[in-house]
Image (cartoon, helix red, strand yellow):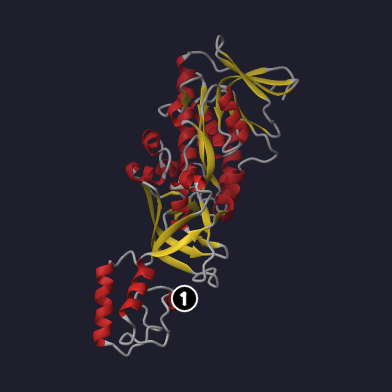
């Protein structure tokens, strides 16, 4: 940048998903607007690059807003208005129109057909260049001042490097810098805590079974007067339990788990499609019609065979025992292990690159019709800097795309309403 301050229409702090998409959208709406994206590091779009193991889980094929918002432990109410204006199907159309065809996988996650995040990154970089959106790396913000008379922001990077803008978007993700700046403007910060993590569990039933997966389970966790439930696939790992069902539970119970220092008990139902009454009937049928059949090779529910043997061991049932030999007391233990198996969480483990935080700028201080601050005119927010987070499956990215879109639309409306040519970005 030039050492003398210059004025631009839209300055975006954060070179991630929300920052890039908002800058591109405003440039599409107001072609001559001066727009800059300011990234503190030497790289941009890092979460886009690593998402989905490098494939980029763009969004999810949930196109009904009322169902879509249910995937957000924090922000469900506020996002209804945001998603009513820009939702997953709109993102897919935008990408298709910009040369990035997508595909929907069986679990609902949506990826580029190329199976490479570079397809999305190249698209964004191409569009910023084509539309004249300037991208500056290694620009760590030292301070931002707001002039309530001229209604502009002065961004200071170093002693001699400053930028003045009419509209400012904070899209800094979970970084402390973004939260610090928001606080400097008078915004409240909901203390961030981790979300989306797996559970560290030491238990003989799973100790020797890392990599074993379960197609569908129900999980329940209680905290005094609060109860959290989750359903979906689960996975045994070297450190305990993971998989979509566990991660979803970690998101919805993020604050309670943090308060408990990640020590809590939880129950797993390995037979969500069959009630206890149904299982009791199945046991009775086996005892009457197949009394000599051994339990080792006759799983009551479709559990992985190696885990079934661990269940029998936990119930103190000899795997050579037949249905006619097993005691009623052992059957009660067996039903409990299938329907209400109890485990103790001792700690948490970050879930690879999908790490997300619960917390950020207080949602009550933001107008979600515009993504604008209710405290400072011209200040906008998008993405994870807000106290909004979601479960896995592309939902966190959708929050970024949608918030960025709405913010850009709002800035465009403001620029048009002034009936003046946008400020030139020459020499910046």
- Residue 366 visible from this viewpoint: no
For this view, does 274 lie left or right of residue 23? left
Rendered residue at 40%/27% (across/down) = 369
Q: Is residue 40 above or below residue 283?
A: above
Element carrying mark 1: helix
Q: Residues within 10 Å of mark 1 (few under 14, many from 20)?
A: some
Number of marks present in the image shown: 1
Rendered residue at 37%/83% (across/down) = 295
Task: Depth check: give the residue in front, 288 or 79.
Answer: 288
Q: Is residue 237 above or below residue 170?
A: below
For this view, does 95 lie left or right of residue 5? left
Question: What is the residue that sits farthest to the top in this orientation?
Answer: 149
**Rendering coords of residue 162 (x, y %):** 69, 20
**Rendering coords of residue 394 (x, y %):** 47, 48
**Rendering coords of residue 411 (x, y %):** 49, 23
Task: Depth check: give the residue in front, 290 or 162.
Answer: 290
- Residue 282 visible from this viewpoint: yes
Quadrant where the N terminus lies? top right
Question: What is the residue that sits farthest to the front in this orientation?
Answer: 329
Quadrant where the C terminus lies? top right
User: What residue sits right under mark 1 in the picture?
Assistant: 310
User: Which image quarter: residue 158?
Assistant: top right
**Rendering coords of residue 243 (x, y %):** 48, 59
Q: Is residue 297 above or below residue 2?
A: below
């Amino acid at each position: 940048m030039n050492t003398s301050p210059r004025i631009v229409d839209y300055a975006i702090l954060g070179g991630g998903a929300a920052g890039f998409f908002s800058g591109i959208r405003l440039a599409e709406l107001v072609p001559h607007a001066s727009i800059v994206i300011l990234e503190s590091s030497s790289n941009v779009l890092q979460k886009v690059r690593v998402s989905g193991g490098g494939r980029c889980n763009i969004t999810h094929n949930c196109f009904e807003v009322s169902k879509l918002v249910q995937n957000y432990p924090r922000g469900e109410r506020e996002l209804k208005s945001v998603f009513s204006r820009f939702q997953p199907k709109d993102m897919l159309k935008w990408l298709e129109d910009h040369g990035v065809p997508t595909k929907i996988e069986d679990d609902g996650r949506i990826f580029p057909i190329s199976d490479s995040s570079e397809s999305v990154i190249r698209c964004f970089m191409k569009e910023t260049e084509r539309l004249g959106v300037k991208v500056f790396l290694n620009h760590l913000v030292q301070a931002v001042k707001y002039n309530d008379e001229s209604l502009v922001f002065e961004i200071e990077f170093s002693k001699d490097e400053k930028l003045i803008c009419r509209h400012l978007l904070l899209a800094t993700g979970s970084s402390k810098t973004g939260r610090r700046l928001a606080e400097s403007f008078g915004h409240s910060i909901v203390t961030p805590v981790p979300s989306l993590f797996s559970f560290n569990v030491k238990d003989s039933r799973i100790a020797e079974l890392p990599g074993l997966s379960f197609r569908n389970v129900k999980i329940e966790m209680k905290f005094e007067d609060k109860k959290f439930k989750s359903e979906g696939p689960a996975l045994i790992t070297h450190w305990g339990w993971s998989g979509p069902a566990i991660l979803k539970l970690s998101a919805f119970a993020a604050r309670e788990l943090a308060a408990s220092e990640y020590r809590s008990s939880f129950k797993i139902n390995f037979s969500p499609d069959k009630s206890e009454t149904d299982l009791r009937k199945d046991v009775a049928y086996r005892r009457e019609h197949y009394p000599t059949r051994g339990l080792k090779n006759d799983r009551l529910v479709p559990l992985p065979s190696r885990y079934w043997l661990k269940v029998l061991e936990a119930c103190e049932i000899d795997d050579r025992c037949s249905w006619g030999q097993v005691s009623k007391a052992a059957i009660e233990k067996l039903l409990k292990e299938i329907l209400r198996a109890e485990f103790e969480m001792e700690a948490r483990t970050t879930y690879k690159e999908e790490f997300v935080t619960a917390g950020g700028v207080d949602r009550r201080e933001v107008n979600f019709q515009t993504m604008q601050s209710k405290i400072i005119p011209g200040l906008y927010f998008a993405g994870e800097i807000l106290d909004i987070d979601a479960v896995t499956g592309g939902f966190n990215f959708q929050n970024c795309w949608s918030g960025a879109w709405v913010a850009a639309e709002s800035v465009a409306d403001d620029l048009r309403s002034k009936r003046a040519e946008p400020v030139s970005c020459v020499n910046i």
